[in-house]
Image: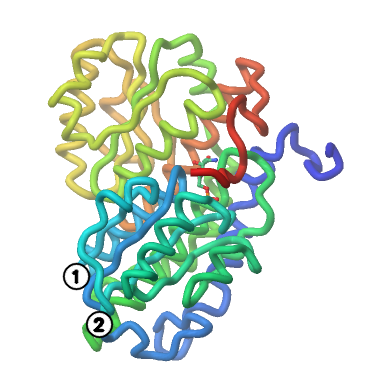
Amino acid sequence: EQAGKGEYDHFMLKEIYEQPTALAQALEGRIDPENGRIALENFEPGTFADIDSVQFVACGTSYHAALYGSLALKQAGVQSTALLANEYSVSAPPIDDDTLVIAVTQSGETADTLTAMRHAKAEGASTLTVTNVVGSTAAREADEALFIRAGPEIGVAATKTFSSQAVMLTLLGQRIAADLHGEVPANLESLLPELEAMPDSLQALLEQSDAKAIAERYENSQSYFFIGRGLGFPVALEGALKFKEITYEHAEGFASGELKHGPLALVTPDTPVFAVFNGVEDEKTLKNAEEAQTRGAPVVAVCPDGHRAVDIADAHLAIPETEPDLAGLLANVQLQLVSYYAADLLDRPIDKPRNLAKSVTVE
Ligand code: AGP
């Protein structure tokens, strides 16, 4: 097992550091250099022209990636929603022949997600899975499959596959919007170079992260809160899931604006608040973070150097400058590292947290 980890103490850390390569693999050949259009292997231009709406189904970390994909698709003017696969049978919106249901699943074997996908198919929807595993049940049963090409992920905590899923869903969203509207989405021109730069941006972040020092500074806190807005919201949820999964400490993720609607009652000097800034209504997020800070909570700003939040926050985790649509993905990697180092300080069995399985094959 040690051989597989190479120079790293845990598979999770190795997989965090594999993200620049994983993202390069996810992007490879999928952006047409001629016209900047998104080229997805089995999908001819116009494939998605007749889609009415998109429903994503997924669980856990894959659900957070689905939420990210769904928000990006809405921003591109496509009717879309992300649903927890295990709630789908009781909460699915109407489905018809023009509904596209996208099952997001790293393993392609999650029972809840397979059940939701089968239900959608039986109701007449087209199905597509975004998965890491060629030959998985999801890949075999869906009408179409797109592979994230992240390589094997051994750690129970999903890391590189979240980033690869989010990038894959960004590409897919752009492509669906282009097919539906008959023109390349307005933001693609500025997004493409930043997408292509993601592997390098991530590499730079990994080489300079202060996550270990932050984990040490806030060790022994009572609870850990994560907030974000827009595409930063799924990142906040994912930051909290990762933290609780491997540290066994209490962590919660909130939409920044929700803090004042209840969770603020929990805030004390013992509850650090990690605030993700992604260039979307950052002033409001800053105000929300300050409301927590006024109640004594230390605020850790996850944002580029020079951002206004750095002056106000108690601590800073730096991310490279990028497009607002991608900033959350960089922030997420800093949060993965904080979780990892916090769990390491507590001497947790990071790659195999108690009570959890890599792939959950029961409903
Ligand atoms: C995340 O760290 C978890 N291990 C878990 O939430 C996981 O993402 C979920 O069980 C879904 O798995 P899948 O992507 O293989 O469907």
- Judged left or right of residue 39, residue 174 is left
Question: Is residue 136 at all visible to an observer of this figure?
Answer: yes
Q: Nearer the viewer, residue 279 or 44?
A: 44
The residue that mark 2 highlights is 180
Q: Nearer the viewer, residue 109 or 187?
A: 109
User: What numbered label is drawn on residue 77?
Assistant: 1
Residue at horizontal 53 percent and vertical 70 percent from the top: 141
Answer yes or no: disc 1 within 8 Å of ligand 1.
Answer: no
The answer to whether mark 2 and mark 1 are in CB contact below 8 A is yes
Question: Is residue 24 at all visible to an observer of this figure?
Answer: no
Distance from the alpha carbon under mark 2 to that under mark 1: 9 Å
Residue 234: percent from the left, percent from the top? 34, 45
Single out the residue that lies furthest toward the front: 122
Q: Dot 2, crowdedness within 10 Å: few (<14), some or many (≥20)?
A: some
Residue type highlighted by circle 2: Leu
For numbered disc 1, what is the local secondary structure?
Answer: loop
Residue at horizontal 51 percent and vertical 78 percent from the top: 30
Q: Nearer the viewer, residue 242 or 24?
A: 242
